[in-house]
């Protein structure tokens, strides 16, 4: 089988040429800004001993979203979220703990209880609503945070939240009232 050699004189792909010219344009027009960004990145890199991959991850501020379709009566809200993050997104207990503002030992214990209750993987179906994990960065409970977000941000009724989480309507109402009181006191 004969190996094909690349022709060094062959032109770049048209799309790559567009990208290269765009980047050169930015570098010339925004030279000062680009230099300042490089300096700041270098400062972060040396101060915190970050790799290039870690810097990119730091800049790539993607929100982790959890579909509402993972919730089931068999599992608590924390158990369902932990199981989803561990099995579907392959996150470590430490990462899950950071995202949920909980101790990683608590997350490990929760996941082990989950494995006993619900051996099979979660059935994830297309979901209209998603839960951003950034809402858990306060001192409210997991269910209180979820209900507060669903009610205030998604404008869902108590009944709709109850159906999505497979909980009782009165439980949802109670969690919302408690969350509102706690937020008002803070």
Image (tube, grey):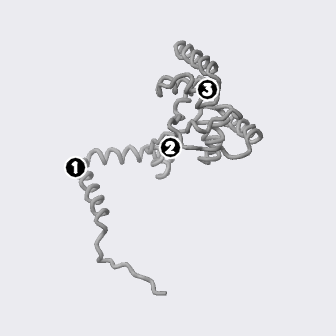
Vertical order, 184 against 68 (above or below)? above
The reply to whether dot 1 and dot 2 touch (C-beta < 8 Å) is no
Numbered disc 1: secondary structure: helix
Numbered disc 3: secondary structure: helix
**Reading the chain from its start, which is encountered first: label 1 or label 2?**
1
| Separation (CA) of disc 1 from disc 3 | 49 Å
- Residue on which the image places disc 3: 143
Q: Position of residue 157 (x, y in %)?
A: 52, 23
In this view, which residue lies farthest toward the left? 29
| 10 Å crowding of disc 3: few (<14), some (14-19), many (20+) | some
Q: Residue at x 52, y 36 (%)?
A: 130
**Reading the chain from its start, which is encountered first: label 2 or label 3?**
2
Q: Position of residue 146 (x, y in %)?
A: 56, 28
| Number of numbered callouts drawn | 3
Q: Residue at x 63, y 40 (%)?
A: 94
Vertical order, 37 against 138 (above or below)? below
| 10 Å crowding of disc 2: few (<14), some (14-19), many (20+) | few
**Reading the chain from its start, which is encountered first: label 1 or label 3?**
1
Left or right side of 74 for 157: left
| Separation (CA) of disc 1 from disc 2 | 30 Å
Residue mark closest to the camera, 1 vs 2: 1
- Residue on which the image places disc 2: 48
Residue mark closest to the camera, 1 vs 3: 3
Taking depth in this image into account, of 117 and 99 the one nearest to the observer is 117
Vertical order, 109 against 169 (above or below)? below
Numbered disc 2: secondary structure: helix
Q: Which mark is residue 29?
A: 1
| 10 Å crowding of disc 1: few (<14), some (14-19), many (20+) | few
| Separation (CA) of disc 2 from disc 3 | 35 Å
Taking depth in this image into account, of 82 and 98 the one nearest to the observer is 82
Left or right side of 155 for 166: right
In this view, which residue lies farthest toward the bottom? 1
């Amino acid at each position: 089988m004969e190996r094909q050699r690349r022709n060094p004189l062959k032109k770049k792909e048209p799309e790559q040429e567009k990208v290269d010219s765009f980047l050169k344009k930015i570098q010339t027009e925004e030279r000062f800004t680009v230099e300042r960004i490089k300096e700041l990145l270098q400062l972060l890199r040396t101060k915190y001993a970050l790799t290039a991959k870690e810097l990119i991850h730091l800049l790539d501020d993607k929100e982790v979203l959890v579909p509402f379709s993972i919730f089931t009566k068999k599992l608590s809200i924390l158990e369902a979220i932990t199981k989803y993050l561990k099995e579907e997104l392959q996150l470590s207990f430490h990462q899950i703990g950071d995202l949920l503002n909980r101790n990683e030992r608590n997350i490990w214990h929760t996941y082990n209880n989950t494995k006993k209750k619900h051996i099979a993987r979660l059935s994830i179906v297309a979901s209209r609503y998603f839960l951003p994990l950034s809402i858990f960065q306060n001192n409210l409970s997991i269910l209180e945070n979820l209900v507060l977000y669903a009610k205030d941000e998604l404008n869902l009724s108590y009944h709709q939240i109850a159906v999505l989480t497979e909980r009782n309507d009165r439980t949802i109402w109670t969690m919302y009232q408690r969350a509102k009181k706690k937020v008002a006191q803070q």
